[in-house]
Structures are given as C-alpha cells and as structure tokens.
Amino acid sequence: MSAKSPDKLTSQDAEKELDRLAKLIAAHDRAYYSHDAPTVSDADYDALRRRNAEIEARFPLLVRPDSPSHRVGAKASAKFAKVAHRVPMLSLDNAFDDADVADWLGRVRRFLGLADTDAVCVTAEPKIDGLSAALRYENGLLVQGATRGDGQEGEDITANLRTIADIPLRLKGKPPVLLEVRGEVYMAHKAFAALNRRQEAEGKPTYANPRNSAAGSVRQLDPAVTAGRALNFFAYAWGECSALPADTQSDMIAAFASYGLPVNPLMRRCETVAAVLDVYRAVGEQRAGLGYDIDGVVYKVDRLDLQARLGFVSRSPRWAIAHKFPAEQAETVLEGIEIQVGRTGKLAPVARLKPVTVGGVVVQNATLHNEDQIARLDARIGDTVVIQRAGDVIPQVLSVRLDKRPKSAKPYKFPDTCPICGSHAVREVDEKTGKMDVDRRCTGGLVCDAQTVERLKYFVARDAFDIEGLGGTLIELFHDKGLLKEPADIFALTEKPAKVAQVLADHRAALSEERREAQGKEVAKAAKARKKDEGEGKQVENLMAAIAARRIIGLDRLINALGIRHVGETTARLLARHYRGIDAFLDGMKAENAREDLQHIEGIGGVVAEAIHDFFDEPHNVKALGRLLRWLDVTDMAAPSKSSPVSGKTVVFTGTLEKMTRAEAKARAESLGAKVSGSVSAKTDIVVAGPGAGSKLKDAQKHGVAVMDEDAWLALIGG
Ligand code: IVH
C-alpha cells in the first residue's frame, strides 16, 4: 500500500487509489460478511477504510458512487431482527498457564472467604470453537434462537437454528416452563472438509476454518442454505430459567442431557488444581482426534449458590475461566516498522509483515509493543520473525530468527520525536517506583494533532456520542480548519451552519481548482456534476440535526467519551451505575478521597482509579468538561435494581464480617443498587459494623447514621 500522506497525492494518484481501495474493501467485505472467511485482520481492514476516508476528505470530488464510506459496514446484522438478551451473554476471562489457573482458584477462595484447604469443586469441559447461541424453550418448545451479538443484543436466527438436527424442537422429560439454553453451534471437521469440497466444485469461495463456516452457515438469510450445512450444537450454560432443575453446574448439564440436549461427554468434576490441570492435559491430548475444533478448557465453580455469590466482573463471571491452548505461530519477513500515535500520545510500533496465514487468518501487521521490546528482540528490517496469534488478541512479534538474518537487515532507530507533531517523545519516570515507563509518549498534548484528532474521533464514536455523519473524515477536516479543538466545539458547530457549509465548499473549491489544473476542463465538468448529486446543503442540515440530537446523552456514554485512560465502555458503565447522575459523579471526582472511593467500586482497580483521578486533577480537563456540559442534558443511569431496599443508599462496611468477605459484601450491595463507600459522612445511610469496628462506628454516631450488624444487614437484603 502506498503510504503517501493524502496531502502529497496528486488527484490522479488519489483517483487511482480510491478505485483500488473501493475494490479491495468490497472484496474483504464479501469475504467477511458473505463467506465468514476474513482475508484481512480487523486492524488492517480499519486502516484501509481510514485511508479511503482520508483521501476522500482531501478529494471530496473524487468520492465514488460505490465508495466504501457510503456503506457503514455491509453488516449482516441489518438482515436479522434484534433480540435483547434479558440475561446478558457474557464472555470468559482467560488463563494462559497453570499459574493463572491456580491464581483464579485462589481468587475464588479468597472472595468466598474459604481457607486454602477448603475444597471448591469445579467442572472442566472443552471450550468449543464455534459461535454461541441462545435457545429459548417455553413449555418445552423451541420458540426462539439468537446469536450472542454484543452480549446485550443478538440476532434472531430461530429459523436457521431449527434446521440443526442436534437442536431439539421439543424437549423431553419435565423441563422448566421457561428455559433459555446456551451453548455453541459448531461444524465438525468432516462436514467442514465436505462443505469446502462442494464450494470448490461449484466454483464458490472456500471457508478459512470451521468456526467461520459455522458462523456463515447460521447467518444465511435463507434457512434452506443452513439446513444444507451439517452443523452441531453443545449446550453448556443457560440464561433465563423459571425454576432451576439442579443446584450444581454438573447436575444442570445432566438435566439438559435428560431433556435431549446434546452435552459434551468430556466434562469432568474436579476437586483440586492438580485434577483440573490433568483434565486440561488429557483434553489437549485428545484434541486432534475429537473431530471438531476446541481452543481450550473451561472451568466453572460447580455449586450454583457459590456461582451466584461470586457474580461478575465487568463482562466475565468470577466463577468461570477459559484455560486456552497455546497460540499459533508462523514465520514471516519484517518489512518495516511504523509508528502510530494514539489518543494518549503513546508511540506504538507496528510491524509491517509480509502477509502470512496463522491459524486460518492472514496477518500483515503485528504489535512490537514498545521500543524496549524492539531492542530486546534486536528486530531489524528484513529479518525473519516469528509471530504469534492467540484468539482475538492482536498478533505479536515473538522472536527473531537470527540464523536467517540477511546481510542487508537494517537496525531500527526508535524516534524520539512524535512523527505527527514533532514534539519530543519521552519516557516518563514513575515517581513512586522510580521505574521508566515502557511507553514513549508524545509530549505535544494539546498541540499534537494526532492526539487531539484521535480524542475527538473517540468522542464521536459509536460507543460514545455516536454522532451520525460526523466521522473521522469530517473531524479531521474541521480540525484542520480550526473549527474543532475540543468536544464542546462540536456542539458549537450547530451555531455556525454557514461557516460549516463554507468550510466544506471552500475545501471542494480548492480541490476543484487543483483538479482543473491537473486534468483540464473535461474532468472538472464531470466532477461538478457529481458534486451536485451530493446535496451539499442537505449534508450540513443533517449534520447539524445529528449533533443537536446528541445534546441529550446518557451518563455512561458521556464518561466513555471523555477518553480517560483505562476507562472504556465497561468501566464507564460501572461508574455511571455507581454515581447515577452527572452531579453526583462530578462531586465524587472532586471529593478529597476520590481515589479511595473509586477503588471501592466493584470492578475498578488501583490503576483505573489513579487514571480517573489524574484526569480530574488536571484543571484543563475539568474546564473543557465544564464547557462541554453547558451544551448537554445528561440523563441519569437507571438504578440496576429499583425494588431493592438498599438501592440508592450509601453503605459503609467496617469491622470484621463473618459471613462473607469484604469484597463479596461490596459486590452484593452494589448489585442491589447500593453505593459502597470507604468513609462515613452525613451522606452515609447505613453503617454495617462487625466486631472490631472503630472510628467509623464513632463517625456514624456523630452523624446520626443507622448502624446495624451483619445479620441485620443480611436480613435487610434478603439473606
Ligand atoms: S460458558 C458466563 N462454556 O467461549 C459464561 N463458554 O470466550 C458462559 N464457549 O462466549 C460461557 N465453549 O461462546 C462456556 N464450554 C463452554 C464454552 C464456552 C465455548 C464460548 C462461548 C463464550 C466464549 C467466551
């Protein structure tokens, strides 16, 4: 790919490249959406679309009628009806080695307040490499089938799932009135090979691996096509259930089997880490002969009451973990190293590789992490490198084949200035530890266009303000023209539609001039005709309306949009749930003990609390947020459980708790909608005091706060 900046392209080059990109992106779209056989990594695909958008921003007259930017993802999801998951479909945390597994069981024990000697029974079963599906049975009849989607909302694929012979349309025995079975749809190796043979014979594209072909097969609009594909299913979990038929994971699965649902025969119950690891190794040995793809072993705490107590951290249950099999590796040539500057100013080195297939996916880029890593590996341009790809993780360069180093291999010098703004790029020294940060960061802050623009792009992105029509291209254009520096400026655009229209028109005129010079009148005429089609005035009008529509925004989206380091969608939601409203959130951030209070929020650890604190400690950020808030009406986050007697209450735990650990008490209280704080003030509603309570108990008396012991608390929240 030509890495020439769009600024430096002539319009002839640009036209050629837009043509190339349109065809390339359309081919990748077809491969991904229609055949579920991605031919490019997500990052590369995004880079292609970005490049297309960048060139279009510079050359709006060259925007093709079939431009990829007109199609905001040829997403298959648009084809199926949406299904809201009443119980979210979560993912699993990963363990990569034996120590991670032991750590997990240790965490489980500590959370439950168990001694090292107390047995915790867990199940171990293969992790099927397919796609997860939810099957809703009412009175034993299959009424709905859905994909996982984003975990909150999936696609209705009932008609397709009905065609899978493994999935009973009617359950046997006496299943609960309402039962939502969850499990994995997969394609066995034999069926996969046969399907690809058929595809080939019919001159159709083949699938990269069984998972993609299973996904492609259930996402067919015509159920007859799905019916022609041999798919299988294993049930391993559940969502909504009117009455649980068992009280352990293993008995639930046994009940599923009795209803006629297919369950994996390799599931075992284990009492110790050693036993769990034995299953892992045994399953690993059987892996090649199973006849279907698995990518690890999943462990789950067996007792359902313990599962309930353990609950969830952001998107994964504490009571389960996936022990992954080692990642797949491949060798290829390091053709170059490119530096990307992110919104936090980090200079991220990306290895540009000779394309190579790793575990069914073509890899062209891999992370080199940071400059120390490049030095440690002694990676030089032209070297043969070993890369590794594990699941959905970004591929990484593992090592260099020094024995294959060509004489021409060129050492790489990591830049000490930002490639975007030219500011010094430095490695900070952590005051507390005295250690040098592994990342070199651009010191340009507000003057660094990469950071400003990346932050603004993040602000308008889908999980944040989601402003329709205001994508990366326009953000860059408005930023270049001095209309945008900070989020508040986006809303200020609504007061200057004439100026916005002018910027767009000027830009077009300038390019048109350039074009006329470059290519003569003929082409310019054609371009003018195209310009008319675009309905410029309408574009400005729509944009103004889309921006104005986002002046009402949910607290979670707002927090996510701020782009605080380590705070993404999930953490933003945790914060919004905790503080509920913008005023409480801002008060909380201003409070003296903000950092400690943040750490008391379930799911928020020290590093994240520190980053949030740092953000609000910076007067510039607070001022910019203040300017933004003048435009906004921030809606409160709904309480998770309105009916709970403690929802909305501020609770402080002090002294020793005997029936549960502090972490568990906090998690329970929060799941019931209470806010757990570390210190007692006039705003505290309840202090739960155990033996040994000291100053906090006194504070409670001073402020006249209700005090209760652990038993009274448990009685209040229903045990
Ligand atoms: S349990 C609340 N068990 O792995 C956790 N998941 O990486 C529910 N998967 O989304 C999942 N085999 O699609 C579970 N035996 C198994 C599984 C399994 C495959 C998938 C599932 C999940 C993903 C998480």
Image (cartoon, rainbow, N blue to C red):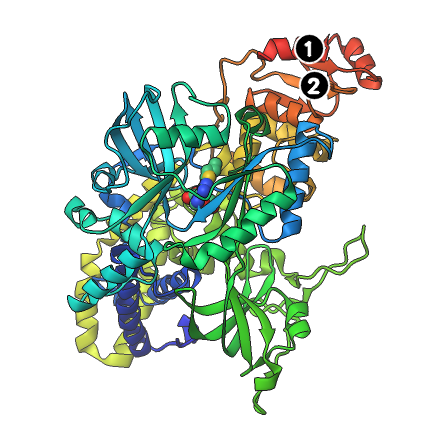
Q: Residue furthest bottom?
A: 407
The reply to whether dot 1 and dot 2 touch (C-beta < 8 Å) is yes
Q: Which residue is mark 1?
A: 711
As helix, strand or loop, the secondary structure at mark 1 comes to helix
Q: Quadrant of the C terminus?
A: top right
Q: Quadrant of the N terminus?
A: bottom left
Residue 492: quarter of image: top left
Q: Residue 659 bears which disc, if any?
A: 2
Q: Is residue 540 above or below residue 236?
A: below
Ligand 1 contact, mark 1 (Cβ < 8 Å):
no
Q: CA distance from mark 1 to mark 2?
A: 9 Å
- Provide residue 708's location: percent of width, then percent of height: 72, 9
Q: Residue at point 61% right, 16% down? A: 649
Q: Is residue 451 above or below residue 139?
A: below
Q: Is residue 380 above or below residue 647?
A: below
* 85, 699: nearer the viewer: 85
Residue 264: quarter of image: top left
